[in-house]
Amino acid sequence: MKNVVVYSNLYFMRLNIQRQLGRLLVVNGYLPKILLAALIGVVTGFVAIAFHETLSFVTYWVRYPWTGEASLPYWTFMVIPPLGGLICGILIHVLTKTPEAAGQGTDNMIYAFHHQGGRVRKRVAPVKFLSSIITLGSGGSAGYEGPISQIGSGIASSICSLFKMPRSLRGQFSLAGTAAGLGAIFKAPLAGALTSVEVLYKEDFEAGAFATSIVAAVISFTVYTAWIGIEPMFPGVPNFNFVNAKELFFCALLGIFCVPFSLLYVWSYNETEKRFSRSNMPSILKPALGGLFVGILFIAYPEIAGGGFGFIGDLMQDKQTVAGLGVLTLAAIAIAKIVGTAFTVGSGGSGGVFGPALFIGALVGASFAGIIALLFPGVLREPEAMILIGMGAFFAGSSKASIAGVVMVCEMTGSYSLLPGLLIASVMHVALSRRWTIYKSQVKNKFASPVHRAEMDPDVLRVITVGEVMIKAPIHILQANDVLSTVKPFMDSKHTFPVYDQEKYIGLLEMNSARYNLITAPTLSEQILVSDCVVKVPLLNRSLDLHSAMRLFLRLGNTDFYVKNKEGAIVGLLSHSSILKAYDNTVSQKKN
């Protein structure tokens, strides 16, 4: 009995110490937030160094049999991307069971910000680190920024947990982690900070996170360059200058020229990701199949392997090619990179789509310069400048981060002399490509983000009923005794589904639980019932006001509610985006 009392006293003493430390670690106030952002920058900077060195080491030794003295025929390298994809699939889906580490990291970061308050599981950062090294080191066609942005946000999430950060501030520091990763790996601190706050929305910024993102990006950049070196990613780029409006006109034409390539890039990636997600193939084999397609493409276009920035640097020094020779070849490499990236990342390989966008844009710019040189010889004094302008314009239009793309190219080259042409080309591309984006988790603006629901004026919502804004569409109803495998065709749906036990409503299908079971236990999908993945969620009366509905959204954490009539039959769907759109429309009408 005495031992029990002693143990109990020690337990409560430890609990009291933890509470006291927790109070000390709570961050409150502007200066502590800046210091926390600096800490995130320091940690992310060191992780970026480790990522760079590990990737260089792995890439060198994986490719050594093809680059050494007794090198193998280059086409035999085609077996390496599928092997890397297989190892990546085993690591993500079998050894660690971390499916959120698959695919593009930046989009996962955006989703976590909007829907999870910036919270990222602690295991995601190390798994993303290793899986990305495997994908990129084995020749996968992907970028560095996706992994490092998700790793940075994961580091920030873990630090926020240590410092007891509330959900309202956790998202802000996840963006600081993203900015720190991008600012370091691209040696572009301002562009890293701008990207982190701009890429969340199609037509808005997360202005409140800019200060902490700047601090984290600058600190991370300082740590990273102290080890790697301060020279920009593309050193030795000539100091291109514009001297007349004629050259700016051709920059605007280049922005228009980027549009079909941008559409192809987004469509190819989305279509490939959709088809792989619907496939019945085991998850561990999907990245291997994607790698096989990349390996086949590598035979004809070896330039698509990895990030490809070395090829872009060489291209800028080859004035003859840009001046008109090999235009079709350059366009073909750009299309091959589009397809290769779609299969690498869309199949579940770990990588980013930011870097490939810069690569594709550079080749599109070079092709455009070649066409202009053939049609109007001598009109472009420095056709190589179009390579850099194409990089910024293509990324701006495909990601809807127009300012970040422009600044990124300027910092990567160490020169702002191209700024006028970059801005004109980016604006033209964004204006003509507003209907698509490579980041599917982007939302239109702050009104469309669940993070900013609490900022709305409740009086506006009290005068609008659920029935006025609900979506009146055919409702697909599931039965409780259906097996989980019947849900596979609906895995890409953005909505949940009502579940009935005979004629009685019992709740909604919890899509995350269903996806988890289908991924981790595909052989049991014929035994697990839909009722095993149901969460109890009430039906809303169509006469309920939107303010009350919003309180339910916040209390239960759902993204959808189904609406019933007086007889209890389901007549529509209410999503948080419907409420936000109704609020936005009402406020806009009042202003007018």
Image: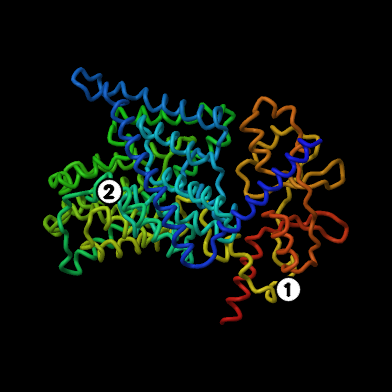
Left or right for 330, reference 585: left
For the point 41% across and 54% down, which residue is it? 179
Image coords of residue 367 (percent x, y): 24, 48
Q: What SS does tag 1 mark?
A: helix
Residue 568 drawn above or below residue 14: below
Give me the disc on residue 480: none
Task: Say how the picture is coloured.
Answer: rainbow
Q: Name the quadrant of the N terminus.
A: top right
The kind of residue tagged 1 is Arg
What residue would you read off at disc 2? 226
Q: Name the quadrant of the C terminus.
A: bottom right
Image coords of residue 568 (percent x, y): 86, 56
For the point 18% across and 20% down, which residue is it? 69
Residue 257 visible (yes or no) = no
Q: Are marks 2 and 1 in contact (CB under 8 Å)?
A: no
- Mark 2: give few (<14), some (14-19) or many (20+) Cα within 10 Å: few
Give me the disc on residue 462: 1
Say which of marks 2 and 1 sits in front. Answer: 2
The numbered mark, 2 or 1, whose residue comes first in the sequence reads 2
The kind of residue tagged 2 is Ala
Residue 213 visible (yes or no) = yes
